[in-house]
């Protein structure tokens, strides 16, 4: 009896695997937090992907797309359940999404176990496409690694002549990886990180942290997430500290930028996207997005828009037929797309090679909008940045993943 | 009044029907049922405290968490517990849950009522803090990924096999807890719940009774954690977070405290709404909220209170009819 059941389930599993290969429509699962603390970001993610679909008549590469959005409620466990639901019940060809790094970590093994592609379109945990990649043969990423833009920012800060910098970053893995990338390049170039401050995730009152900042530093590096991003610049400037800010792009993402005050004008941040990138591709995207959803797109939206574009190109190459997971990954790796964020391709560790934009907040008019608004205007572009910066793959992977204590703070007293 | 034997029979038949129907209803249902049962063990351990001893613990996720982290750390760092030694991990999970509860109990049992609630909440947050910040051991915010489930002749990687295993643990836990609350020890717990002072005057060491109940609940929490880790293949601080404790408490209240079965039903309903209904409609949160509000307004005894409420109503109607009949015309 029991044996029969196993046989039955094994057969069903076999059929389930065989089915999508013949299906004419492309079934895509999309995991995003559409309720809970991160609901707005989740919605922005879905909107970005949906915008591309709508612009292309609901087709990618000629295949009709069935997009199934599932809510992970911002919890990795729930994300796993929903991913399995998408695979087992909806028989999706691939699933996309996952916002938090922890969700990305939780979803990657699901792709291995179920032999279904997980395409991470936001979640940026470094190690998934670095030291742990071999565990996840069905995992690929169209977004970024947390440290990628901050390597470039470290170089830029060094080139500005900053010698001593304080880092203030949210106290969790994403914060560690952004600071790690920045510190590594900045110090290799001759700069010194003289102090690292780690306010807990979700801190709204920086009163206890601001007075401890060393007075002799030249600039401040910050990684602020969500509501923290709004509060920090306000409180820092309010306390009379006028040091320049060089920040992770998430601190000034368009997700928070429109709600910020004029005190942020002149602050510099780095990311692989910014709504103020002055190219025709981006102008078209920003206008379309604003017309449809009434707000500026941030990287959450752009990354999913360009993910759809990337899948579109891949499916065009295979003539609109799902090629199976292995061939799909190969096709994706062979493509270079011209996304709103600029030219993007994929390295052999299945992570994008993309431009990094050093951006300065300015109150200006862009793309023909007649109102003065805060924009992330690009002041320097680092083209074709890989997740290994200029270190080379082998040398980079020989060091441990960036952490709270790596690279060690040699110049902190 | 339905006799106890009939009640046991109903539960047994319900469980068997559950075990028979679920594996035939698609892999996603199997997965959900497995998750719900693993969590239901935690909810029942909360019920032992809330429903039978009258202590509302806000920190039950701590024991759940240490069980889960123990499993994940052993599996990834020492490759231990992926074969026959899975059973050792189960035992260790129970023991570590008990041990932590034995430690926390020393602080928590001294207090009662809302103070107990606050102390358990604080202690639970300590464990969350450790999980979140002890990066070298717990992987911090990213958590720990496990590769596959144990295989000891029985391949637990098969969802249906794993479902049966968790079902067995769930059923055995329910039976053990039932035996426990029906024992003289369980009766004295109920006595403490009703009137602790009187029990003390009668010569009972109420502190020790509560302490032992607390430790036992911790053990079941640890067991639930071990199963939970293998259900998801992933453990993160989200497992130990305050909402896990609150959820388990709400599930017990929803199903009906002091019934054990109610805890399981409450878990099933919350999981059903949160993880199944949410795949169908976007307004699942209103449904969940509505269920909570309606339960608190109309069923203070939880869903398990429905039969007795129903009886009350028919009884009062009967009485009303009798009164009418006895009225001189």
Image: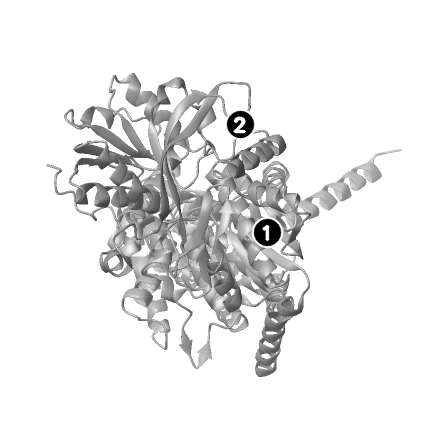
> Are discs 1 and 2 both within one chain?
no
Chain of residue at mark 1: B
Q: Where is residue B297 in the image (x, y as percent from the top left)?
A: 61, 36
Q: Which structural element holds mark 1?
A: helix
In terms of depth relative to the viewer, which is nearer, A131 or B274?
Answer: A131
Q: What residue occupies the far right of the structure in this picture?
A: B329
Question: Circle 2 sits on which residue?
Answer: A367
Question: Circle 1 sits on which residue?
Answer: B269
Relative to A48, residue B44 above or below:
below
Q: Residues within 10 Å of mark 2 (few under 14, many from 20)?
A: some
Q: Which structural element holds mark 2?
A: loop
Q: What residue occupies the far front of the structure in this picture?
A: A280
Between marks 1 and 2, how big is the CA–CA gap? 51 Å
Q: Where is residue A293 in the image (x, y as percent from the top left)?
A: 60, 33
Q: In which quarter of the image is the C terminus of chain A?
A: top left
Q: Position of residue B135 (x, y in %)?
A: 27, 51
């Amino acid at each position: 009896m029991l044996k029969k059941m196993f046989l039955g389930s094994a057969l069903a599993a076999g059929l389930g695997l065989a089915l999508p290969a013949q299906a004419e429509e492309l079934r895509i699962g999309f995991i995003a937090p559409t309720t809970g603390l991160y609901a707005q970001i989740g919605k922005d993610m879905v909107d970005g992907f949906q915008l591309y679909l709508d612009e292309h008549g609901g087709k990618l590469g000629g295949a009709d797309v069935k997009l199934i959005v599932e809510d992970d409620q911002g919890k990795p466990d729930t994300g796993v359940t929903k991913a399995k639901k998408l695979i087992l019940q909806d028989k999706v060809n691939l699933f996309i999404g996952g916002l938090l790094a922890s969700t990305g970590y939780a979803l990657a093994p699901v792709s291995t176990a179920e032999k279904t592609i997980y395409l991470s379109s936001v979640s940026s945990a470094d190690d998934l496409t670095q030291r742990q990649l071999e565990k996840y043969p069905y995992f690929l990423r169209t977004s970024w690694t947390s440290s990628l833009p901050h390597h470039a920012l470290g170089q830029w800060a060094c080139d500005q002549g900053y010698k001593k910098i304080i880092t203030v970053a949210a106290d969790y893995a994403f914060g560690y990886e952004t600071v790690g990338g920045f510190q590594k390049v900045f110090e290799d170039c001759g700069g010194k990180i003289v102090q690292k401050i780690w306010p807990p995730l979700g801190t709204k009152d920086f009163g206890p942290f601001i007075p401890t900042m060393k007075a002799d530093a030249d600039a401040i590096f910050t990684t602020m997430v969500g509501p923290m991003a709004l509060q920090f610049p306000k409180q820092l400037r309010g306390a009379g500290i006028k040091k320049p800010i060089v920040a992770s792009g998430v601190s000034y993402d368009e997700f928070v930028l429109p709600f910020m005050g004029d005190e942020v004008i002149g602050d510099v941040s780095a990311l692989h996207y910014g709504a103020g990138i002055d190219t025709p591709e981006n102008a078209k995207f920003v206008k379309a997005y604003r017309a449809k959803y009434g707000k500026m797109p941030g990287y959450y939206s752009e990354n999913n828009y360009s993910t759809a574009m990337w899948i579109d190109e891949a499916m065009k190459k295979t003539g609109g037929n799902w090629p199976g997971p292995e061939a799909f990954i190969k096709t994706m790796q062979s493509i270079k797309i011209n996304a709103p964020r600029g030219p993007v391709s994929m390295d052999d560790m299945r992570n994008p090679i993309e431009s990094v934009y050093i951006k300065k907040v300015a109150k200006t008019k862009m793309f023909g909008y007649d109102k003065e608004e805060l924009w992330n205007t690009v002041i320097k572009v680092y083209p074709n940045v890989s997740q290994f910066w200029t270190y080379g793959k082998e040398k980079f992977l020989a060091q441990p993943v960036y952490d709270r204590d790596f690279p060690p703070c040699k110049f902190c007293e | 009044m339905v006799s106890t034997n009939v009640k046991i029979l109903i539960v047994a038949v319900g469980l068997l029907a559950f075990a028979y129907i679920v594996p035939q209803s698609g892999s996603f249902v199997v997965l959900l049922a497995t998750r719900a049962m693993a969590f239901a063990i935690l909810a029942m351990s909360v019920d032992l405290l809330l429903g039978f001893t009258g202590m509302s613990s806000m920190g039950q996720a701590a024991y759940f968490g240490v069980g889960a982290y123990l499993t994940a750390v052993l599996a990834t760092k020492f490759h231990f517990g992926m074969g026959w030694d899975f059973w050792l991990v189960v035992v260790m999970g129970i023991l570590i849950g008990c041990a932590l509860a034995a430690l926390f109990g020393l602080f928590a049992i001294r207090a009662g009522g809302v103070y107990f609630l606050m102390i358990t909440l604080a202690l639970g947050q300590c464990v969350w803090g450790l999980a979140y910040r002890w990066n070298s051991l717990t992987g911090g915010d990213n958590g720990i990924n496990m590769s596959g489930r144990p295989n000891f002749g029985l391949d637990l990687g098969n969802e249906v096999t794993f479902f049966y295993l968790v079902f067995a643990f769930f059923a055995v836990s329910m039976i053990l807890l039932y035996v426990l609350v029906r024992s003289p020890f369980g009766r004295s717990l109920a006595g403490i719940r009703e009137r602790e002072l009187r029990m003390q005057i009668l010569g009972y060491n109420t502190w020790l009774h509560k302490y032992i109940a607390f430790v036992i609940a911790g053990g079941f929490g640890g067991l639930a954690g071990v199963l939970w880790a293998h259900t998801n293949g992933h453990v993160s601080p989200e497992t130990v977070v305050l909402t896990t404790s609150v959820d388990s408490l709400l599930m017990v209240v929803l199903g009906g405290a002091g019934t054990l079965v109610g805890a399981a039903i409450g878990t099933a309903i919350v999981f059903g709404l949160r993880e199944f209904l949410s795949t169908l409609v976007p307004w699942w949160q209103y449904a969940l909220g509505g269920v909570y509000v309606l339960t608190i307004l109309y069923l203070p005894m939880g869903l398990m209170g429905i039969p007795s409420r129903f009886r009350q109503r028919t009884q009062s109607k009967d009485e009303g009819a009798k009164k009418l009949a006895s009225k001189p015309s």
